[in-house]
Image (tube, rainbow, N blue to C red):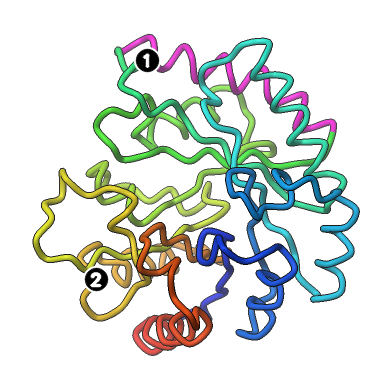
Amino acid sequence: MAQLHFALNHMVAPQLSVQEFFRLATSLGIDAVEIRNDLANSAILDGTSPDAVARAAREHRLTILSINALQLFNDWSPERKEEAKELIGYATACGAKALVLVPKNDGTGRADGERQKNLRQSLIELKPLLDAANIIGLVEPLGFEICSLRSKAEAAAAIDALEARSTFRLVHDTFHHLLAGEDRLFADLTGLVHISGVSDPSVSLSEMRDPHRVLVDGKDRLDNLGQMKALLAAGYRGPFSFEPFAAEVHGLEDPSSSLRASMDFLTART
């Protein structure tokens, strides 16, 4: 089995500054990170220049995999275009390789025909912006029933219809993959994997939400191990990026030791 390549999403420790977050990654022997534009301490929201982020990444010998994320990407508008251009510009300047694209998740835009049309329009509009900057668009379907793009199959079909695999890849999120009930992996189109676990035995599958998402351990109910093994067996060789949302993880006094324990657990079993 291939060796696991771990990465860290800033959501593992949102209370940390970017410098502290980069230091955490380095302390774990991790060489790849995702920065975010939705955290109070994030470089984008706090006004840190992309040049400063790029310098910090070089100091810590880190690759910035992505900026997470352009929200509502499949609800295209002039405002969305400007937001996309700003994030792509920041990605270029800080050295990020990709921009995560997150769909509407408010119960609207779900009708058959409507959602496919909206997705196609957004990909068509984003493609020249991303290509000009040499930035990859990472499409991340969300498994929630109210989401306007739950299916990786639909995302893959739209990407292939536009012959746009050089521009767009998929995010396989282990949490959302299970919630969506999809069987197909699309390992050859996957550019990034997000990993998190749910260990609470009392919550049903349909009730699972971001606050339930913890670090993966032996109590995991999402079958992260099975999903990761299947992706590796299908040829995926990209990073597995930790992305827990639970307050209990964010409140850890020593996130390094907890992350190390999860890394060791996964490494020993894949």
**Quarter of the rendering containing residue 79:** top right
Query: Is 117 contained in the magenta span?
Result: yes
> Secondary structure under badge 2?
loop
Residue type at tag 1: Gly
Give 231 or 140, whichever is nearer the viewer.
140
Give 252 or 34, whichever is nearer the viewer.
252
The span from disc 1 to disc 2 (Cα, nearest Å) is 32 Å
- Spot occupied by residue 13 in the image (x, y as percentages of width and height): 53, 66
- Residue 178: numbered disc: none
Q: Looking at the image, which residue is at 67% across and 17% down?
A: 125
- Residue 109: numbered disc: 1
- Spot occupied by residue 130 in the image (x, y as percentages of width and height): 75, 32
Quadrant of image for the N terminus: bottom left
Give 172 or 83, whichever is nearer the viewer.
83
Q: Main secondary structure of the magenta part?
A: helix
Q: Looking at the image, which residue is at 34% across and 29% down?
A: 147
- Residue 220: numbered disc: 2
For marks 1 and 2, the one nearer the N-term is 1
Which residue range is magenta in the image? 112-132
Residue type at tag 2: Asp
Q: Looking at the image, which residue is at 48% across and 14% down?
A: 118
- Spot occupied by residue 164 in the image (x, y as percentages of width and height): 64, 31
Q: Is residue 148 above or below residue 233?
A: above
Label 2 Cα crowd, 10 Å radius (few <14 / some 14-19 / many 20+): some
Q: Is residue 262 above or below residue 146?
A: below
- Spot occupied by residue 35 in the image (x, y as percentages of width and height): 66, 55
Label 1 Cα crowd, 10 Å radius (few <14 / some 14-19 / many 20+): many
